[in-house]
Image (cartoon, rainbow, N blue to C red):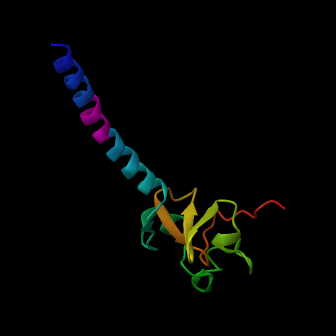
Amino acid sequence: MLQRRSFLKKSALTLGAIPAANLLASSSAWAAGEVEITEDDPMAMALGYKHSVDDVDTAKYPKYADGQLCDNCVQYKATSEGWGTCAIFPGKLVAAKGWCNVWVAIPS
């Protein structure tokens, strides 16, 4: 009887850990921002995000200045070659050479 209880407890714990492990894996993938943002994403459009600073409409976004790039913004964290996560666009990758109207210089 004791062996049966022990087996059932271990089985329940193991089976209970599988969904938790899947949840952790999926949330860490989301946190890593593995989906590249598109310029037609509603939030990207609202903030004037562009994959390349060459495409920024300076008449519409006069705040933009030469040298401002996602990769030198306080919101950005590099994750791969040319892409990174942004606190403004959770779950999305932004281009390192991109820009949006929320750009803030990294403090020296």
Above or below, comparing residue 37 to residue 15 in the picture: below
Q: Position of residue 78 (x, y in %)?
A: 60, 67
Magenta stretch in the rendered image: 13-19
Query: Residue at image x 42%, y 56%?
Result: 29
Q: Quadrant of residue 14?
A: top left
Above or below, comparing residue 93 to residue 51 in the picture: above
Q: Which image quarter is the C terminus in?
A: bottom right
Q: Main secondary structure of the magenta part?
A: helix
Spot the residue most to the bottom: 54
Q: Quadrant of residue 69?
A: bottom right
Residue 7 relative to residue 32: left or right: left
Above or below, comparing residue 33 to residue 8 in the picture: below
Residue 101 relative to residue 11: left or right: right
Tell whether position 71 is magenta. Answer: no
Query: Residue at image x 51%, y 59%?
Result: 89
The residue closer to the viewer here, 65 or 19, is: 19
The residue closer to the viewer here, 62 or 10, is: 10
Residue 48 appears in the figure: no
Q: Position of residue 3 (x, y in %)?
A: 19, 19
Q: Which image quarter is the N terminus in?
A: top left
